[in-house]
Amino acid sequence: MLNENMKAIRKSKGLSQEELAVKLSVVRQTVSKWETGLSVPDADMLISLSEVLETPVSTLLGETVVESSADDLKVISEKLEVINLQLARRNTTRRKIVHWLLISLCAVIVIVFAALIVLNSPYLDWNYNDPETAVFGAAFHVFEYLYIRLAPIVLIVAVVGIFMTRKKA
């Protein structure tokens, strides 16, 4: 049991007998004898073996370890490939959505700027004796004031974002 488990785990880790022997500070023949069942490692060596193979001692001594076949690895690699393709598609879709949202934001900013230019601050001619007109005029003025100062910054950031999210050739 120990010999079979040790051999299967060593192979699954991609180690040769020689490499395992070097890590354990023993000769290759000793590892060969352990794997063929001609001898067994002592308790201290068994602990070192479990540390090198990154496997609990109970696994080395316990149930049979099944080597992963090439078919199992192929199935796993195919599943990982499918997952990677799905993630790539999702990232591409997100990038496109952000790209078009930024383009839309730029269009809205330009349209609102055009509307503000055409309206030419109409609230300046309003009669502010009516409280509702005064509140609406003050709100419109605050909107225009903040918009004129913040919109260029947002526009620049959006244009940079458009260039950063464009499709790469």
Image (spheres, rainbow, N blue to C red):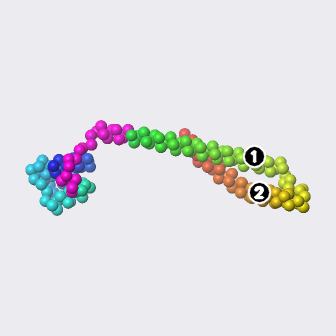
- The answer to which of 154 and 144 lies nearer the viewer is 144
* Residue 163 visible in the current orientation: no
Residue 74 in the image: x percent, y percent?
33, 38
Residue 25 in the image: x percent, y percent?
18, 59
Left or right: 25, with 138 as reference point: left
Please tell me whether residue 156 belongs to the stretch shown in magenta.
no
* Residue 56 visible in the current orientation: yes
Of the 4 image quadrants, the one containing the C terminus is top right
Magenta region: which residues?
57-78
Which sits earlier in the primary sequence, circle 1 or circle 2?
1
Q: Residue flagged by tag 2: what amino acid is it?
A: Phe
Residue 9 in the image: x percent, y percent?
23, 49
- Which secondary structure lies at badge 1? helix
Q: Residues within 10 Å of mark 1 (few under 14, many from 20)?
A: few
Q: Residue at x 80, y 51 (%)?
A: 116
Please tell me whether residue 68 belongs to the stretch shown in magenta.
yes
The residue wearing badge 1 is: 111
Left or right: 66, with 115 as reference point: left
Q: Residue flagged by tag 1: what amino acid is it?
A: Ile
Residue 146 in the image: x percent, y percent?
74, 58
Q: In which quarter of the view is residue 48 placed?
A: bottom left
Q: Main secondary structure of the magenta part?
A: helix
Q: Residues within 10 Å of mark 2 (few under 14, many from 20)?
A: few
The residue wearing badge 2 is: 143
The answer to whether marks 1 and 2 mark residues whose Cβ atoms lie closer than 8 Å is no
Q: Residue at x 15, y 61 (%)?
A: 43
- The answer to which of 155 and 5 lies nearer the viewer is 5
**Alpha carbon separation for disc pair 1 and 2:** 15 Å
Q: Residue at x 58, y 42 (%)?
A: 96
Q: Residue at the left extreme? A: 38
Q: Residue at x 84, y 54 (%)?
A: 121
